[in-house]
Structure formats: C-alpha cells, structure tokens
Image (cartoon, helix red, strand yellow):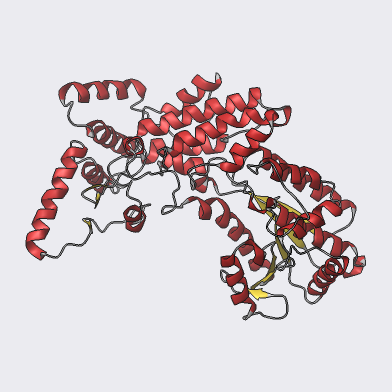
Amino acid sequence: MTKILTKEMLRNTIETIKLVYKEDNIPWICGYSGGKDSSAVVQLVWTAISELPENERHKTIHVISTDTLVESPVVALWASQSLKKMEESAKKANLPIIPHRLTPQIQNTFWVNLIGRGYPCPRVNFRWCTDRLKIDASNQFIKKILAAESEAILVLGSRKAESAARKRVMEAYEGKRYREHLSPNGSYPNTYVFTPIENWEDTMVWQFLMQHANPWGHSNKDLLAMYRGASSDNECPLVVESGTPSCGGSRMGCWVCTMVTEDKSLAAMIQNDEEKSWMLPLLDFRNYIAAYNQDGDLSQNALDRSRRDFRRMNGNLTWHNDRLVHGPYTKATREDFLERLLKLQVFIQQSGPEEVHNTELISMNELRFIRKIWLNEKHEFEDSLPRIYEKVLGKKFEDNSIVKNKYYGKSEWDILAEVCKDFYPEHDLLLEMQSGLLDIEARNSAISSTKNIIKNLEDKIRQAYFKNEEDAEDVMRQRLERRDKLHNDIGETILFNDEQDDYTSKDFLEEDC
C-alpha cells in the first residue's frame, strides 16, 4: 500500500528540523532545484524556522540553486522567480534564509565547451557536463562557507524511495553518522548531510505540497502542472493505490541533454500543452547536435564522425577497433552550431510567450569567451564569430576584451585558404597548419617576445603533420605493424602517445565514435 503523510509524521519531521537546527551553530546549506523534493525540504525548513522565536533563529540558512544556463526556459524561469520571491518573503518575515543563484564559471559552461573548445556532446561514457555545470558551482560555494565557518550542514531532499541504489548509499552513510540525523559527506570533511524527508515516498511529497501552501508565495499547483506536463501520459496522481505511477518519474533537466537518445520530458511538455509549442525548435536543435541514429546507436553514426576531427584536441591520434577515434568538432561544425543556436534564440524571443522574450540561450559573456578560444587557442584569425552574430541578430558584436592579430584577418585567411586548396588540394590540414604558424609568429612579434615560440611552432606542425585522415590511418597501421614485430603481444586498444589533453584515453576508448 502507498504510504500517506499523516499529521503526526509531518509534525515529527518539522520538530526534527527544529531540533537539528538548534543543536549547534553550524550554518546550513539547502539544495534547491525547484523540483518537488527540494521544494518540499525548503518549505519544511521555512515552516520549522518560522515557528521558532526570533532569538532562536541564530544561524544562517543558505538556499542554493544551480542554474546550468541550459535549463529548460520554463524551468529556469520558474526557479528564478521562486528565488526572488523567497528572498523578498524571508526579509519580510525576518528569517535567516538567504537564497543564492549559482552558475558555472564561464570556462565551464556548456556552450563554451561544446562550441568553443569543440567537446563532443556528452555521452554515457564521456559525461563532461555534470561536474562542470552543476557540481563545481555548488562545490565552490561550499568551499567559501567552509573557509569562513569551518563547518557546514547540507540539507538535501534525497529520499530512499528514489531508487534502490540511492537507498543503499543512504543506508551506508547512516551507519557512519556523526550524530543522530547527520550523516558524513563523502566529498568534504567537516560537512554533514541532513535529509529530513529521507523516508518519504513520492505521493507523500506531493500530498504535502498540495495540502500546504508555499510560504514564499510560489504556487505548488503550478509545480504540479509542470511535472504533469513533463509526464508522457499527462498524469500525476497524488494519493493512489499500490502500483499506480506518480509524478516521481518526471525529469526536467537541461534542454540540450544528450545523455539519452530521446528527451521524453521536454517532448511530453510540448505534446501536452499547445501553448508550449514554441519550444519544439529546442527539441529539434537538441536532436540535431545529438546526431543519434534512429536506433540510438552512435558508434556507427557517419554524421557524428563527419562533424569531428580525426585527431584529439592536441593533435594526437587514438586507435581503436581498427580505426581512428574522432575527437573535437571541426571548425565548420562549431560555426554551424553557433549560427543555428543564435537563430533559435531569436525565434524563442520572437515567438515565445512574453515572459521569455528576454531569454538568452547563450550569453554575451559566453560568446566573448568562445571568440577568445577561437582566436587565441585555435588560431582562427579570420574571426568568424562576430560575423555570424551580426548576420543572425542584425547588430554589431560588442567586445573590447580581445587583442586581435593586427597583421592578419579575414581577407588574408581567404587568400591563404585559396592558395592551400589550389596547390595542395589533398592536404586537408594545410590551412590549419599555415594559419597557426602565421598567427603564432604574429602574436609573438606584436609583443616582441620569443619565449616558447619555437616549441609552439613545432607543436603546430606536429598537430597538422598528416595530409588527411586516410594518411593518418596509414601511419597508425605502420606503427602497429612495427610494434607487432617487436612485441607479439598487442592488446585490443593501442595508444601511441602518452601525452594528455582535455580528453582522457579512457574517455575515447569507452566511446567508439
């Protein structure tokens, strides 16, 4: 039978929160995503602290919400509005609750890595997004609190009923508890985890949210509607018989998430509400960059391989299953993604409801950082980003942070590209090598410095050593044959260069794409 939240259970939970709060002077950090579990926990904490006399509200409660900057516009708007209301209401009620909207550092954002550096879309075996977009931002905040206060208590909405794996982990930490209700945090010393609703089920969470109004004025019924909209059957029962599904399976995360072959929650949200049809292009763009086959098999996907360089980020080669493992996105692919993303942003602002008319799918700070990567790290001195921006948005790209190559620009790039193509058409990497050599030399001349210039020139030549992918494959096979003669003991996978870059060998070996 499905458990029902009784008045006694609710009162016990609130009293437990009061007890844990008053036991010490350690500040609290509440995780808040705007979802049902974190909403319930923050609402319970708010209720409990409100019942305390003002002189007993002796320590700060930080409510942190991490915005990955690629959340669904609907969810992002919901969370940001909730935080604003929470801040205003907490001040009026004289509660020591301070909300914080956390975002990834500029070098860690999704678009800086995907479009700027050319990282392939996140996959199960190359999940570079979670740490950069979510975990790092929260960890940086926790470190600041620890630096100031030495200790911290994390108040989370984790529940054992979420999954068997979650239950095992939580029960394992229970056996190591610092004191009653406080489990150790495996990531940081001097931090403890408090999970007030650890024994609640999905239906109990929804029962609480529907029967008790949100104290900072955000609508729990709208939250239910959002979850219902993200469910494929448009159902979200609250008090049900055993075996009846609830809203617990709805997952509303990043709209660009490529960890799954199909974004069912976003698709359901669009299907269930005609007023959200403006989000359909978001789904189409996500599917475009994901480049999955119809059966979800990426390993044999010719489109995905054609978008990516046959070398790793630093020019090294990785050999697996008798072929090269492709690395970062090519220049043409990165530019294509950027242009399509900006067009999508214009569409959302013009066709979406009034509340999303100012939505930026990619920020100006991200665009400036991407431009810096393309110019400084990839030596693409034609400087295509401002032209793409101006083409799509019809206005000048403002950026005073870049010191451009004063010798070369688009006209020189075009001449160089034409010469390389006319005289050496089979040398696919010649333009990249020549432009890189010219840019490196010009930058060093501009600052009258010769430091590391020889090494940098040699590295660029080494990166573009091959004519094309076929030539690189021939070289790798020759190396394989030589090694075979020497060892007679070759494993499934051979790595021919020990140098490391942003991709680890393990990442590439596990993802044969």
Q: In this view, does 472 lie above or below 283?
A: below
In which image quadrant can residue 335 be found? top left
Where does the image place residue 489, in percent across and percent down from the top left? 14, 65
Q: Is residue 205 above or below residue 374?
A: below
Where does the image place residue 146, in percent across and percent down from the top left? 64, 68
285 and 9: which one is in front? 9
* In the displayed structure image, the side of residue 496 where residue 32 appears, left or right: right
Q: Residue at x 58, y 66 (%)?
A: 164
In which image quadrant can residue 371 be found? top left
Count of number-bearing discs: 0
Where does the image place residue 198, in percent across and percent down from the top left? 70, 67
Is residue 4 at least partly visible in the picture?
Answer: yes
Q: Residue at x 14, y 44 (%)?
A: 474
Residue that lies at the very extreme toward the left in this rendered image: 485
Where does the image place residue 15, in percent across and percent down from the top left? 85, 71
Q: Residue at x 30, y 40 (%)?
A: 309
467 and 122: which one is in front? 122
* In the displayed structure image, the side of residue 166 where residue 391 appears, left or right: left
In which image quadrant can residue 384 be found? top left
Q: Residue at x 37, y 43 (%)?
A: 298
Quadrant of the drawing holding the N terminus: bottom right
* In the displayed structure image, the side of residue 274 where residue 297 appears, left or right: left
Is residue 401 at least partly visible in the picture?
Answer: no
474 and 415: which one is in front? 474
